[in-house]
Image (cartoon, helix red, strand yellow):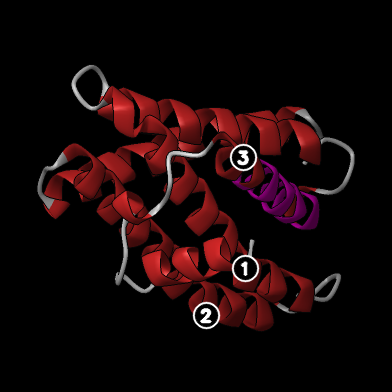
Amino acid sequence: MRAWLLIFWEIVRWRSGPRDLPASAALLRWTVVGYLLTSWLQAALVYGLSNAHWLALGDLVLTVAVSVVCLLPSRWPRVPQTLAAVLGAGALLSLPMSGLLLLRPEGAAHSFSALLTMVSLPLLVWSGLVMARILSQAMDKSLALGVGITLIYFSLSYWLLTPLSQRMGG
């Protein structure tokens, strides 16, 4: 387990990639669980506990779908490693974001919320760049294409999950 965490740390730091992960069903299961937990934590902190599980599940489904579609049809054998890399790095990068959300007091002043947004923006950008790099390496394509796909992913996530959170009372 510790060795896997170190590989994800290296992926986040751009020193490793999905090819450095084993094509392991156990690793994939652990990354799914870790991603769901960290996604649930963020959804609970932003939208409340009541429907955080649906938002976390929706986020997981969208992340998996985009990653798998990128690898169809010629890169299918890379799916387990790519998913593990995307989900594991995503879970790891969401921990500092969750920490920032925990710092936000109830009814925080607008200036404090703006400060947290400014601090969290580089984390969001870094997370997107890490996902872009993982996908570009898995597809053997340029980083620019990975960035484009990641921007589509972020747009889809906003377009699909924001209305879901609003319908659920978030």
Tell me which label, 2 or 1, sits earlier in the chain. 1
- Label ID, residue 26: 3
Image vertical order of residue 156 relative to residue 17, above or below: above
The picture places residue 10, in percent across and down from the top left corner, at 40, 71
Which residue is tagged 1? Answer: 2
Closer mark to the observer between disc 2 and disc 3? 3
Q: Main secondary structure of the magenta part?
A: helix
- Label ID, residue 119: 2
Which SS class for mark 1?
A: helix
* Residue 31 visible to an observer of this rendering: yes
Q: Amino acid at mark 1?
A: Arg
Q: Residues within 10 Å of mark 2 (few under 14, many from 20)?
A: few
Left or right? Give the position of 21 relative to 75. right
Q: Quadrant of residue 122?
A: bottom left
Q: Write the start and end of the magenta stretch as one range.
A: 31-45
Q: Amino acid at mark 2?
A: Val
Tell me which label, 3 or 1, sits earlier in the chain. 1
Q: Amino acid at mark 3?
A: Ala
What is the CA distance from the residue labelled 2 to the residue labelled 3? 34 Å
What is the CA distance from the residue labelled 3 to the residue labelled 1? 14 Å
Mark 3 and mark 1 in contact? Answer it, CB < 8 Å. Answer: no
